[in-house]
Amino acid sequence: MWSCVLSNETDDRADQRLCQDLGLALSVLSLAYLLVCFPTGLCYNALLVAVNLSNKVSMTMPDVYFVNMAVAGLLLGALAPVELLGPAYTRWPAWDPGNEVFVGLLILFDVCALVTMYSTALLSLDYYIERALPHTYMSSVYNTKHVCGFLWGGAALTSFSSLLFHVCGHASAKMAECAKMRNKEAADGIMMLVGYAVPAAAVLYALALVLRIRREAASLEPDPGSPDPAAQRLLLASVCAQFLLWTPYYAGLLAHAVSGGAGALPGRPRGSTYHFLRRLAQLLAFSSSFVTPLVYRLMSRDFSHKLRRLLRRLPGRKRGCGHAHDPGGAQQVVT
């Protein structure tokens, strides 16, 4: 949890009390997340992945993106207790910036963050393609393997700059080239650009195109091949949720990059507030692993049918006439 290590350097009681109050608030929020959001998020993410992978025939392209976000959410959920229970303020040895464990967990966090934002951006672009050209190959589920490979491979490749920075941090004493790359602010700026600015531009561009098509189609007769309006509501809800939860985190990266790092931190008492906001932004980023599957569960019309179909296949379930009259099962056979 929060520890006022930074405020111990001053004898100002007001600064110390402010740090303790902010630390108490952050500790309460972290415990609430770990007790409620953490187990719920793991359960819903695992359920989302299991339900969709067990019904591959009925999967659509949005389902593919939500499955990738759910896998990233599972990894983020696994990282949350390690981060929230042992941040750098407690001087836990595993979270020393020079420790290999810290480097590995940070890179895994960056990859999951990139997969989440890229999936959101591609979900918006594919929805526009489906609106403009219904039943096209690009927005179909047949290229699922290529999409998954692109998302995770692209995220791992994009986060290579952060990995290179940390590796050079270990080898800087031996390699002159690495000594020039010991700039965490530059790594944060790169993550802000490729992890937030580019996906945000893609989402805004896709939504603008979708709104233009919607205005043009308002005066025409409804197309039976157009996407379900529920899909658009799910898209808007998921995009808004992701950007609301991840914007503070990337804003903190931008502030850290612009300010020049720890050497240019605000003075007391603003320093405690700055660190509090950074940790709160990270907590909101972890919360995306809980909100995304919940939005999908509440707004996806096919999720309940797929879940019942999965439960009927579980070992020990009796297969009677109810299974034979399952409309979802009959539809899957027809496809």
Image (cartoon, rainbow, N blue to C red):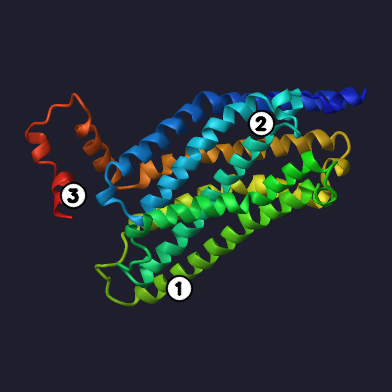
Is label 3 in contact with label 2 (beta carbons under 8 Å)?
A: no
Depth check, front residue: 15 or 140 = 140
Q: Residues within 10 Å of mark 2 (few under 14, many from 20)?
A: few
Which-is-in-front pick, marks 2 and 1? 2
Q: Would you place residue 248 above or below residue 315 in this image?
A: below
Residue drawn where x is 76% and y is 36% of the image: 275
Whether residue 21 is visible, yes or no, is no
| Residue 241, horizontal then vertical, whole percent | 51, 47
**Three-letter amino acid code at the position of disc 1:** Arg
Q: Quadrant of the C terminus?
A: bottom left
In percent of the image, x 63 and y 59: which residue is there? 197
Indicate the secondary structure of the residue bearing disc 3. Answer: helix
Q: Is residue 73 above or below residue 3?
A: below
Q: Could you tell which of marks 3 and 2 lies nearer the N-terminus?
A: 2
Image x and y of residue 331, in percent: 16, 50
Where is the N terminus found, in terms of image quarters?
top right
Task: State the CA–CA distance, disc 3 to disc 1.
Answer: 35 Å
Q: Which mark, residue 104?
A: none
Residue visible at 44% across and 57% down in the picture: 123
* Horizontal arrangement in the rendering, residue 183 relative to residue 229 (left or right): right
Which element carries disc 2, helix, strand or loop? helix
Give whichever of discs 2 and 1 has the lower sequence position.
2
Q: Position of residue 80 (x, y in %)?
A: 58, 31
Q: Which residue is tagged 1?
A: 212
Residue where numbered disc 2 is placed: 101
Tell me the tag on residue 332: 3
| Residue type marked 2 | Val
Gap between marks 3 and 2, in whole Å? 45 Å
Q: Circle 1 sits in a helix, a strand or a loop, which is it? A: helix
Badge 3: residue crowd in 10 Å (few <14, some 14–19, many ≥20):
few
